[in-house]
Image (cartoon, helix red, strand yellow):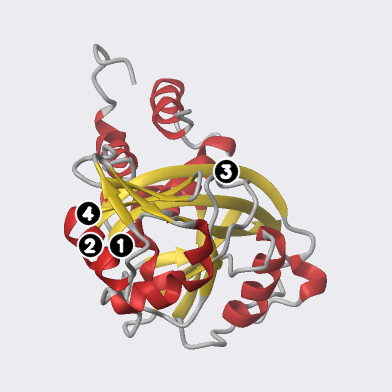
């Protein structure tokens, strides 16, 4: 956003929420984590020392940690030895979001090691006589991260070995009871990258966003215990919740802002400011 342009009062909070997703100023005291020639993450100095203690092959030098490439298959073992949390779900390790998989790492350890995590978000849309509506999920109170926050109809991480679209199809059935025949009609509409400081650590996330037009007869069902309830809201109510409350999960805000921009729900001046904040390089 142009530093001389005051933010539209109606979207000031939304602009702040978008900026919060880019709160990490890397390396910001962290050491660059390398696996052979590949820069795969960022670690705090104390954790770097614990990793070196777990394997004599790990070298520390000015500003970086060097992990021999041969240790990549043991990264989960090293993470556990260093006391990092695990969730029992492996993600691919990539130097760039679209780069080749270099190995796998438990999802729980991604933020501590600053490794890129990939996710998918689905806008479940219903065209009604009074306008377009969106299915909104309320996360279960038992969720470890962001319990009770509002979320997408379908959203989740991309497990190791999955493409983003394959992960979307898997999550659609597991989270909302959405059949693969319908879910396959989803189309990719946007991608988002952010580096964010979070309580769980450094989130270096890459999100694939999809739209899916659903029939009015479809009613999602909580299937795996991760969602407490689903709501069907008009886009005007989604917009009001985004600009007036903190009810939505932090990264959902990016995808929903893009959705509302594409549906023309912001006046020209506000839309220009939001696009500048949202579609950063």
Q: Which residue is mark 3?
A: 191
Disc assigned to residue 133: none
Closer to the chain start, of discs 1 and 2, is 2
Check whether the beta carbons of the residues at disc 1 and disc 2 lie within 8 A of each other.
Answer: yes
Looking at the rendered image, the disc whose residue lies closer to the viewer, 3 or 1, is 1
Q: Residues within 10 Å of mark 3 (few under 14, many from 20)?
A: some
CA gap between label 3 and label 1 equals: 24 Å
Residue 196 appears at what percent x and percent y? 31, 48
Tag 4 secondary structure: loop
- Total of numbered circles in the picture? 4
Q: Residue at x 55, y 53 (%)?
A: 94
Q: Nearer the viewer, residue 255 or 91?
A: 91
Residue 131 appears at what percent x and percent y? 61, 50
Q: Residue furthest front?
A: 56
Question: Which of the 4 image quarters holds residue 173?
Answer: bottom right
CA gap between label 4 and label 1 equals: 8 Å
Q: Which residue is mark 1?
A: 112
Closer to the chain start, of discs 3 and 2, is 2
Closer to the chain start, of discs 3 and 4, is 4
Q: Which residue is mark 2?
A: 47
Disc assigned to residue 44: 4
Q: Residue furthest right?
A: 181
Residue 58 appears at what percent x and percent y? 35, 59
CA gap between label 3 and label 2 equals: 31 Å
Check whether the beta carbons of the residues at disc 3 and disc 1 lie within 8 A of each other.
Answer: no
Check whether the beta carbons of the residues at disc 4 and disc 1 lie within 8 A of each other.
Answer: no
CA gap between label 1 and label 2 equals: 8 Å
CA gap between label 4 and label 2 equals: 5 Å
Horizontal side of 58 relative to 94 (left or right) equals left
Tag 1 secondary structure: helix
Check whether the beta carbons of the residues at disc 3 and disc 4 lie within 8 A of each other.
Answer: no
């Amino acid at each position: 956003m142009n530093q001389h342009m005051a933010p539209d009062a109606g979207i000031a909070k939304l602009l702040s929420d978008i900026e919060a997703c880019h709160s990490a100023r890397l390396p910001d005291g962290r050491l660059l984590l390398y696996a052979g020639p590949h820069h795969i993450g960022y670690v705090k100095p104390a954790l770097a020392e614990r990793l070196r203690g777990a394997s004599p092959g790990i070298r520390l030098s000015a500003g970086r940690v060097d992990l021999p490439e041969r240790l990549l298959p043991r990264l989960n073992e090293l993470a556990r030895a260093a006391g990092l949390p695990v969730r029992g779900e492996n993600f691919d390790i990539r130097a760039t979001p679209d780069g080749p998989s270099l190995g796998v790492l438990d999802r729980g350890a991604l933020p501590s090691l600053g490794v890129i995590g990939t996710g998918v978000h689905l806008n479940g849309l219903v065209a009604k006589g009074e306008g377009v509506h969106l299915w909104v999920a309320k996360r279960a109170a038992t969720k470890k991260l962001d319990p009770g926050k509002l979320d997408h109809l379908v959203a989740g991480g991309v497990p190791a070995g999955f493409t983003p679209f394959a992960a979307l199809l898997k999550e659609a059935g597991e989270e909302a009871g959405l059949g693969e025949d319908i879910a396959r009609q989803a189309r990719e509409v946007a991608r988002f990258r952010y580096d964010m400081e979070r309580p769980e650590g450094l989130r270096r996330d890459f999100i694939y966003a999809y739209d899916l037009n659903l029939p009015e007869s479809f009613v999602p069902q909580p299937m795996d215990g991760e969602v407490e309830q689903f709501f069907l809201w008009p886009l005007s109510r989604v917009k009001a919740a985004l600009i007036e409350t903190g009810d939505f999960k932090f990264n959902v805000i990016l995808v929903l802002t893009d959705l509302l921009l594409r549906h023309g729900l912001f006046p020209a001046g506000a839309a220009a400011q939001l696009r500048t904040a949202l579609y950063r390089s």
